[in-house]
């Protein structure tokens, strides 16, 4: 995992004046956490944005503040979704000697033969999972290969994730990460059954009435 480092300075501008800070090419943020006095900070907008767009929520981002390197995790990113730009970022200061909990994304790779051969549909049930470990041991993401799913109904469970012995998973190991369903064909069959069943019930009622 490549080291991500952002230079920051302390920020005195707050409230409505932060808008002027952004127009001046600065990205506001805040740092808080382990044995750390909360601090409002500002970063160069372009360089910080480039790093933050690539950083996962389980990746250590080193903030250089007052000449010191401080290990953090990105906890909240406020965005302007129209411009696709960061507005404000929260950083949680962490200790490299104490375990923490964090969510790690799950990414799918490969092509399932069941999709090609049986018109199956890939259902990504879990996109992230909560784990615990030292900050530097947290994986950037877990990659799940779905090329092993060759038939409809097959799935991959949490227990199949390749997890380091330094990491503890806080989730049901039997939970489904990804499954191949029958897709449209299955929905049509269910719809057909839903239509047929009421007809049978209604016909039974008419026969009972005729017998009376």
Image: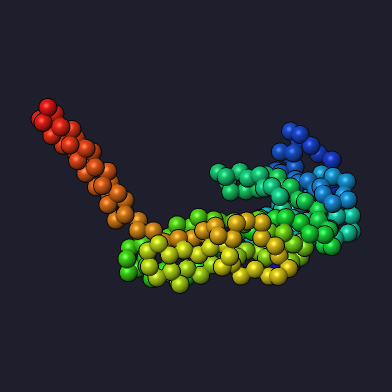
Tell me which residue sits at (66%, 44%) in the image: 78
Return the residue nearer the eye: 164 or 159.
159
Q: Relative to 113, is 211 above or below?
A: above
Point out the residue furthest to the top here.
212
Instruction: Please report the residue visible at 31 percent of the width from the left and 51 percent of the height from the top.
Output: 187
* Residue 81 visible in image: yes
Asked where in the image residue 94 lies, by quadrant, the reply is bottom right
The residue located at (39%, 58%) in the rendering is 181
The colour mode here is rainbow
- Looking at this view, name the residue that lies furthest to the left: 210
Residue 178 appears at what percent x and percent y? Answer: 49, 60
Can residue 121 be seen by looking at this rendering?
A: no
Report the quarter where the C terminus lies.
Answer: top left
Query: For residue 138, what is the image quadrant?
Result: bottom right
Viewport quadrant of the N terminus: bottom right
Residue 206 appears left or right of 186: left
In this picture, is 149 found above or below 171? below
Q: How far across and how far down the image is residue 211, in percent?
A: 10, 31
Residue 65 vertical position relative to residue 80 in the rendered view, above or below: below
What residue do we see at 81% from left, 39% from top? 13
Residue 60 image offset from top left, x and y in percent: 74, 61
Residue 200, given in percent of the width and then of the height, sits at 19, 41
- Left or right: residue 149 compared with residue 84: left
Residue sitting nearer the eye, 172 or 182: 172
């Amino acid at each position: 995992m490549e080291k991500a480092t952002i230079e920051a300075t302390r920020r005195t501008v707050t409230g409505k004046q932060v808008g002027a800070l952004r127009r001046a090419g600065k990205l506001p943020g805040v740092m808080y956490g382990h044995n750390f006095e909360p601090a409002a900070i500002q970063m160069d907008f372009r360089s910080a944005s480039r790093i933050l767009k690539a950083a996962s929520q389980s990746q250590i981002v080193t903030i250089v503040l007052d000449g010191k390197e401080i290990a953090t995790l990105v906890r909240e990113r406020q965005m302007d979704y129209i411009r696709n730009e960061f507005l404000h970022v929260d950083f949680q200061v962490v200790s490299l000697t104490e375990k923490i909990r964090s969510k790690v994304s799950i990414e799918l790779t490969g092509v399932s033969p069941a999709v090609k051969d049986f018109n199956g549909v890939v259902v990504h049930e879990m996109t992230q999972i909560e784990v615990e470990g030292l900050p530097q041991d947290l994986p950037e993401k877990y990659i799940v290969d779905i090329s092993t799913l060759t038939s409809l109904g097959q799935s991959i469970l949490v227990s199949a994730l390749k997890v380091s012995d330094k990491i503890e998973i806080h989730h049901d190991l039997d939970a489904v990460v990804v499954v191949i369903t029958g897709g449209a064909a299955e929905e049509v069959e269910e719809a057909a059954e839903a239509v047929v069943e009421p007809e049978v019930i209604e016909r039974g009622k008419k026969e009972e009435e005729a017998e009376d």
